[in-house]
């Protein structure tokens, strides 16, 4: 059980690293009218990332470090694309928190459920609408293009959620999740 919880926490940490990076792009492209919303998302993901680092250490493991850069799932030339990227980031973060809810118990499960809810609310705001089961939507449709840390193959192996894996032997998400 502990190994499953650690793996789920590490996956959530990778997702938060990628979200922090992605929100940097969002903030650079989003229009002034939504810049505060982008900043709030960026700050929320930084706080979750830092909390997950502590959690992983408390569980006796070394927190995974962020990649130097991440490939985006699609070009982000303007404010509209930035809003779509923010919604995509939140959907992917919700997915890994759904996995952590499944793996964890007690306070960790409650914290993961809260993180999933927050991501779903932000995704709905960015998208202008919600999905029936936040964190599970990507499982009911075809995999979307994944993002991988730059410097690696962009068409490499993927996890079941369509996310790029670090290696073929260990299908852990490494992209913008």
Image: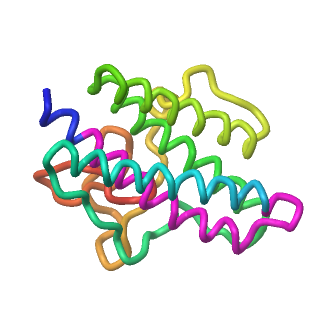
Whether residue 162 appears in this view of the structure is yes
The image quadrant of residue 39 is bottom right
Task: Provide residue 155's location: percent of width, then percent of height.
Answer: 33, 63
Q: What is the span of residues highlighted in magenta in the rendered image?
A: 8-35
Q: Residue at x 82, y 58 (%)?
A: 34
In the image, residue 90 sits, relative to residue 176, either above or below, namely: above
Task: Provide residue 167's location: percent of width, then percent of height.
Answer: 17, 59
Judging depth in this view, the residue of 149 and 18 nearest the camera is: 18
Judging depth in this view, the residue of 154 and 29 nearest the camera is: 29
In the image, residue 42 sits, relative to residue 105, either above or below, namely: below
Task: Provide residue 63's location: percent of width, then percent of height.
Answer: 24, 57
Verify whether residue 29 appears in magenta: yes
Apparent side of residue 86 relative to residue 100 in the rendered image (left or right): right
Q: Quadrant of the N terminus?
A: top left
How would you classify the magenta stretch by its main secondary structure?
helix
Whether residue 146 appears in this view of the structure is no
In the image, residue 13 sits, relative to residue 153, either above or below, namely: above
Q: Residue at x 62, y 70 (%)?
A: 25
In the image, residue 107 sits, relative to residue 25, either above or below, namely: above
Judging depth in this view, the residue of 159 and 112 nearest the camera is: 112
Verify whether residue 10 appears in magenta: yes
């Amino acid at each position: 059980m502990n190994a499953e919880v650690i793996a789920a926490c590490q996956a959530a940490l990778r997702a938060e690293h990628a979200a922090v990076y992605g929100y940097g792009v969002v903030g650079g492209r989003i229009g002034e009218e939504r810049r505060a919303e982008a900043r709030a998302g960026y700050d929320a993901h930084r706080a979750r990332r830092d909390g997950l680092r502590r959690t992983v250490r408390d569980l006796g493991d070394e927190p995974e470090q962020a990649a130097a850069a991440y490939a985006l799932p699609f070009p982000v030339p303007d404010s509209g694309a930035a809003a779509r990227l923010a919604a995509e980031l939140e959907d992917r973060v919700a997915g890994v928190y759904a996995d952590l809810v499944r793996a964890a118990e007690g306070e960790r499960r409650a914290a993961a459920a809260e993180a999933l809810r927050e991501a779903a609310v932000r995704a709905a705001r960015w998208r202008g609408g919600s999905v029936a089961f936040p964190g599970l939507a990507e499982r009911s449709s075809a995999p979307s293009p994944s993002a991988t840390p730059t410097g690696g193959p962009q068409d490499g192996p993927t996890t079941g959620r369509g996310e790029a894996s670090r290696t073929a032997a260990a299908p852990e998400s490494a992209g913008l999740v």
